[in-house]
Image (cartoon, rainbow, N blue to C red):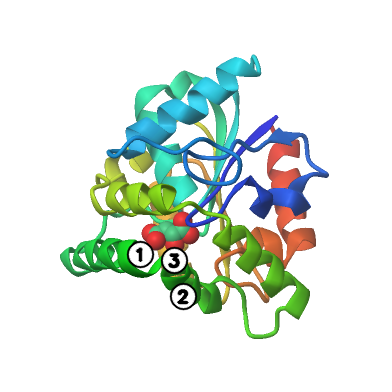
Amino acid sequence: MIVWIHGFPLSSRVFSKQNVLPGFAPDLPGFGTAAAPPDQMTMDDYARHVLAAMDARKIDKAFLAGLSMGGYICFAIARIAPERMKGLILIDTRETPDTAEARKGRYETIENVKAKGVSVVVDAMLPKMLTAQAPPALVTEARQIMMSSSLSGVTAALKAMAERPDSTDTLRNIAVPALIVVGDADTITPPADAQRMAALAPKATLVTIRGAAHLSNMEQPDQFNKAVESFRGDR
Ligand code: MLT
């Protein structure tokens, strides 16, 4: 069983091409079909939301797969409830916190989104989500998923990401095996981030997906699903 934790500003729909694998993908507060979050959210709050969703489905232990912000949430779960993790799948993410400049940018984006709406973030991020070679239908799908994000979901997540802690020590001390996946053309969390994480995690497997940007699971599902299957098959 794999619990898929989506990134920002996305929803569980970003994992539709992983339906062939046994899994469950909750929507995070304010995204997809989930209710709006309270004003203040932290990565620990998102982690507790995922753990509650696992409880509701009676999933005691699972492979936790986090895409980008979903990866930040996996690190929070590793701190709060490591016993719920059978293994870790870190997809196009990083363990480091925001730089001061990135944090400042998040708060500016919050103001922009409040003034002009969610499309501000979608227009800025969509070109980096998929490669220029991605089929138009895939770009449309990614855009629809992103545009379905609510204003409160987006602003709460931006703040939580800005304030997220450094997870370097968390990753260094991960007891379970970790699969680290990255698109070779990801510019949001580039392959160098994945290589650094693979060097830190005690039991890491690094897989680079060819012809993919940030949403490597969506852009190259065959390569991606094979990597996950072989990681799970080995355990
Ligand atoms: C994501 O895809 O979840 C975001 O790009 C993560 C981030 O902005 O740090």
Where does residue 228 sit, x and y in percent of width and height?
70, 47
Where does residue 225 sit, x and y in percent of width and height?
75, 52
Q: CA distance from mark 2 to mark 3?
A: 6 Å
Residue 187 image label: 2
Mark 2 or mark 1, earlier in chain: 1
At horizontal 70% and vertical 84% (from top left) the residue drawn is 133
Q: CA distance from mark 2 to mark 1?
A: 22 Å
Q: 206 and 166: which one is in front?
A: 166
- SS of the residue at dot 3? loop
Mark 1 or mark 3, earlier in chain: 1
Q: Is residue 204 above or below residue 25?
A: below
Q: 215 and 12: which one is in front?
A: 12
Q: Which image quadrant is residue 117 in?
A: bottom left
Badge 2 amino acid: Thr
Q: Is residue 213 above or below residue 10?
A: below
- SS of the residue at dot 2? loop
Q: Which residue in the protein does label 3 denote? A: 189
Mark 1–mark 3 contact, CB under 8 Å?
no
Would residue 135 be visible to someone looking at this image?
Answer: no
Badge 1 amino acid: Val
At horizontal 33% and vertical 54% (from top left) the residue drawn is 158
Q: Is mark 3 within 8 Å of ligand 1?
A: yes
